Image (cartoon, rainbow, N blue to C red):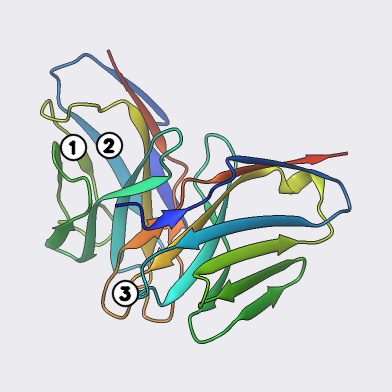
Amino acid sequence: DGGITQSPKYLFRKEGQNVTLSCEQNLNHDAMYWYRQDPGQGLRLIYYSQIVNDFQKGDIAEGYSVSREKKESFPLTVTSAQKNPTAFYLCASSAGSPRSGSPLHFGNGTRLTVT
Amino acid sequence: DQQVKQNSPSLSVQEGRISILNCDYTNSMFDYFLWYKKYPAEGPTFLISISSIKDKNEDGRFTVFLNKSAKHLSLHIVPSQPGDSAVYFCAFRRGFGNEKLTFGTGTRLTIIP
């Protein structure tokens, strides 16, 4: 049963600590994405990767870092430089570039709370 | 620079009636328009999409309308069912080779039994 797995579902961290959110997919998709959802602001793109060992900044990349060493995995690190890290983080994938409008498939998200 | 607006944060509709969700956009370069549905504490799921060369696309109870001259996108759900209660996001793609989707702020739809 193919899908995207994000873990953990809830994560709590102290301010000043880096934290890494996991995202794994078994859909054999080339492209993967990280979005952040805040109340009343919709989904905003943090980083995306179209192919292994390559990634690009999205609209709100400051304070975040990613890696794409394997096709199946696209972890996101929230660093201490991110000013407002508390949010709901969503990982997504698509079957290569969505040149026919092919949609993103989302995981169930990780809610990060930093205090 | 808010390129996409969902002006209604919430909408309540009687079960069996039509639900109409709306999005307005400013960027003429969008080439694909999508609707996603989201339940609490879950990821969004894709509902339906439409290309910029069309003005209507239908899938079962869901129909998406695109008015390019007015830069307006709408989703019609008929008949509305209790399971349709969720947050709905419109999303826009900027064109061939540009992988980013721009999302609206969402509309919370509540179906009243």
Left or right, residue B18 beside residue A39: right
Nearer the camera: disc 3 or disc 2? 3
Q: Which residue is drawn at 65% across and 55% down?
A: B21
Q: Which residue is drawn at 51% across and 78% down?
A: B69
Q: Kindly state the secondary structure of the residue where label 2 is placed.
A: strand
Residue that numbered label 3 is attached to: A97
Q: Position of residue A97 (x, y in %)?
A: 31, 74
Q: Position of residue A68 (x, y in %)?
A: 17, 56
* Residue A1 visible here: no
The quarter of the rendered structure image containing the C terminus of chain B is top right
- The three-letter code of the residue at mark 2 reads Leu
Residue that numbered label 1 is attached to: A77
Residue that numbered label 2 is attached to: A21
| Earlier residue among tags 3 and 1 | 1
Asked if labels 2 and 1 touch by Cβ distance under 8 angstroms, the answer is yes
**Viewer-proximal residue, A4 or B47?**
B47
